[in-house]
Amino acid sequence: MPSEPAPFDPERFRHEAHAIVDWIAAYWQSVASQPVQSRVEPGWVRSQLPTHAPESPEPLDAVLADLDRVILPGLTHWQHPGFFGYFPASASGPSILGELLAAGMGVQGMLWTTSPACTELETLTLDWLRELLGLPDRFDSRGTGGGVIQDSASSGLLCAVVAARERATAFSGNAGGMRQDRRPLVAYAGAAAHSSVEKGLGIAGIGREWLRRIPCDDAGRLDVAALAATLDDDAAAGRVPFFVAATVGTTAGGGIDPVPQIADVAARHRAWLHVDAAWAGAAALCPEFRGPIVAGADRVDSWGFNPHKWMLVNFDCHALWVADRGPLVRSLSTQPDYLRNAASDAGAVIDYRDWQVPLGRRFRALKLWMTLRMIGAEGLRRRIREHVAWAREFAGWVAADARFDLVVPPSLSLVCFALRAGDEATAALLERVNRRGHIFVSPARVAGRLVIRLAVGGPLTDRDDVAAAWAELAEGA
Ligand code: PLP
C-alpha cells in the first residue's frame, strides 16, 4: 500500500511529473499507429472502471495502467496526423508547458491584485498578438480598447452580445431584464454563421427567435443587400437592430463575410458589429492572407478568434478584442465588498473578471506567451503557409479526378468536396474512410450539397499525411 502523499510533496511531484511527460512524449510518437477515431461503444469506458471512488491512495503506476487500458482506446486522437475533421485543435510543446506552469502556480487571476502578472501578461500578450495579426490600434489596451482571453468563441460572442444589449438599452437591461414592454432587440448573422450566435442570444435574454439569418451565397458569404433590407424593415417596424455577427471563415465552408460593407449597414443603425474569426483569424499572421481576414476591423466593435484552433496553442484559448472596453466592463462588472482593493478602487488596473462571465480565471496567458516566444511569429506563419499550400495541392487532386467535385474553392486550409454521384455516395465514402481509421474527416452541407470537409491544421500533420488522405479517399470512392 503506498503511503499517503502530502498535498505538496515536491520530490514526489518531480518524479511523477517526469513519468507523465514521458507518457505524453511516447503518446505523440505512437499516436499515428492508432485509429484516429475511437471505436468504443457507448458506456464502454465507464464499464471498465470501478463504480465507486477509491478510499485509499493508489500509486501513479496503477493510474497510468488504466490510461493505457481504458482511456487511450476511448480517445479520438485530435493530435493524430490523419485528423482532418471539424477544425483541428492544435497543441504544441510550448503551449502544453505553459498550461503545466499555470497549473503548478495555481493562481486565480480574477482581479489584478490577485496576481498582477496574470493580468499584465495577458494584456501584453494580446497587444502583441493584435499587432502580429494586423488588427487596428483601436483594439490595443493602451487606448480605449483591449483584449481578453476566454475559454471559447461562444463565450466571447456571448460577452459581446451582452455589451451590445446594454449599449442598446442605455445600460438598463442588466437591471430591468428584457421585459415584454421594451421594443424588441434584433440580431443578424449569415445563414452560414455558427450556432453559437443563437445560443448566445438565448442566454443573453434576447431570444433565439430574434436572430435573423441572412441568406448567403454558395461560399457561405452573407448577402449584404439582404442584410441592409432586413435591418431597414425591422427599424421601420419599431424594432431595434442591435447586433450583427459577421463570420470570417464559416464552419462549414470557410466563407468570409464582406465585413467593410456589413460595417456600413451596422453603422447606419448603430448596431454592434462582432467578427467571429474563430478558425481563420490565425491566418492573419501571414501578410499574404491578412487582407480579407482583417478587412473592416477598423469599424467593428469586437473581434475574436481561437488560437487553440490553428495557432498551436492547446485547447482552450479564445482571444477577444473590443474597440471600446467601456460597454463590456460596465455590463459585466459587479462590486461586492469582498473583492474591493486599492488598485481597483483607484481605477489603475484591469480586472479581467469584468470582461467575462465567470469571476475566477486561469492563467491562460502563459501558454499563449510561451507559444509566441518559443515558436515565434515566423514559426507560426510557416505552419500556416504549409497548411494552406497542402490544402491547395489536395484541392488540385480533387479537381483532377472526374468522380469528385470541388464544391467551393478551397478556403485557406479547408477543402470541401463531394462525389458527383450525389449525397448518398458522399456519405457512404465518408463513413467508409472514417471506419478504416487512418484519417478522420467530417461532413457539412455547403451549397446545398453534403460535402466532406478536409481541414489541414494538426501539429503532427505533414504533406505526406495530406497525400495519404487523398490516396485513402480516392481509393475508397
Ligand atoms: N465560430 C466558428 C466559425 C466556429 O467554427 C466555431 C467552432 O468550430 C465556433 C464559433 C465555436 O467555437 P468554440 O468551441 O470556441 O465556442
Image (tube, helix red, strand yellow):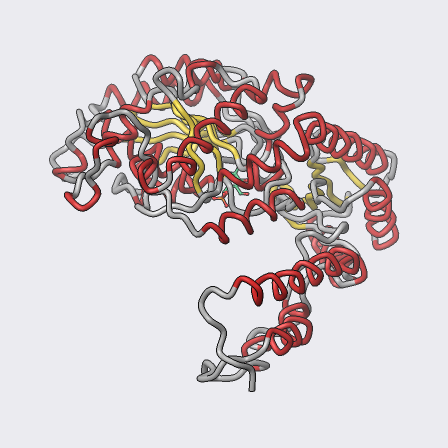
Q: Is residue 1 shown left or right of residue 324?
A: right
Please tell me which residue is depicted at 19% across the width and 27% down the height of the picture. Answer: 169
Looking at the image, can residue 177 be seen?
yes
Res 287 quadrant in image? top right
Q: Is residue 342 shown left or right of residue 224?
A: left
Q: Quadrant of the N terminus?
A: bottom right
Res 326 quadrant in image? top left
* Up/down of 278 relative to 29, above or below: above
Q: How many marks?
A: 0
Front in this rendered view, residue 305 or 316: 316
Q: Residue furthest bottom?
A: 1
Front in this rendered view, residue 101 or 406: 101
Looking at the image, can residue 411 be seen?
no
Residue 283 lies, in percent from the top left, at: 64, 27
Q: Is residue 143 shown left or right of residue 466?
A: left
Residue 335 lies, in percent from the top left, at: 18, 39
Please tell me which residue is depicted at 47% across the width and 26% down the height of the picture. Answer: 124
* Up/down of 16 relative to 63, above or below: above
Residue 354 lies, in percent from the top left, at: 29, 36
Residue 86 lies, in percent from the top left, at: 62, 47
